[in-house]
Amino acid sequence: MKCPICCSPANDISEGDFDGRTIRCSVCGIYEIAGTVKLRFEALCPENRSDALRKAKQFAKLGTRPTISSICISLWRADILPFVGTRESHHPFWPRFKDEKVDPPRSDRIQRRWAQL
């Protein structure tokens, strides 16, 4: 089989109790793709697939395999985060949609930062 990220030769080493796929690639390493996101992952372009693997490696705990899950893919879906690349996408308390109301945060430190925006 081919690696879905870099298209180099790879092996599917999935075990019976895992609903996704476990892939061993000589370039990307060993990683898992959760069964719940398999179709959405395959619909991504190659650049976004490699970014999803990079996110999975960041989220993986020491000694565990990186798993590409919904959080790794949802960062690239336009219906969840429509302002990718803009100021709004990088601030946690900024409205995601044009008419969405967002309450300011409660802590004093964050309220001061909120007032600066």
Image: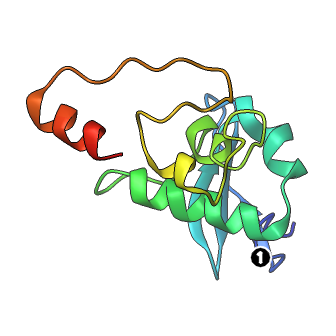
Q: Residue furthest left?
A: 108
Q: In this view, does 5 lie to the left or right of 93?
A: right
Q: In this view, does 86 lie to the left or right of 58?
A: right
Q: In which quarter of the image is the N terminus?
A: bottom right
Q: Quadrant of the C terminus?
A: top left
Counting labels gives 1
Examine the image and state in which quarter residue 48 appears.
Answer: bottom right
Q: In this view, does 9 lie to the left or right of 72?
A: right
Examine the image and state in which quarter residue 26 appears.
Answer: bottom right
Q: What element carries label 1?
A: loop
- Residue at the spot 86% in from the left edge and 63% down from the top edge: 45
Q: Which of 90 and 9 is in front in this view?
A: 90
Q: Compared with residue 103, is residue 69 higher up or lower down, i.e. above or below?
A: below
Applied colour scheme: rainbow
Q: Can you give x and y, in whole percent of width and height, for residue 6 in the image?
A: 77, 76
Circle 1 Cα neighbour tier, 10 Å, few/some/many (<14 / 14–19 / ≥20): some
- Residue at the spot 68% in from the left edge and 29% down from the top edge: 98
Examine the image and state in which quarter residue 77 appears.
Answer: top right
Q: Which of 77 and 54 is in front in this view?
A: 77
Q: Can you give x and y, in whole percent of width and height, for residue 43 in the image?
A: 89, 49
- Residue at the spot 41% in from the left edge and 59% down from the top edge: 58
Q: Compared with residue 20, is residue 54 higher up or lower down, i.e. above or below?
A: below
Q: Compared with residue 76, is residue 10 higher up or lower down, i.e. above or below?
A: below
Q: Can you give x and y, in whole percent of width and height, for residue 109 in the image?
A: 11, 37
- Residue at the spot 61% in from the left edge and 20% down from the top edge: 100
Q: Which amino acid does label 1 sit on?
A: Cys
Q: Name the residue under label 1.
A: 6
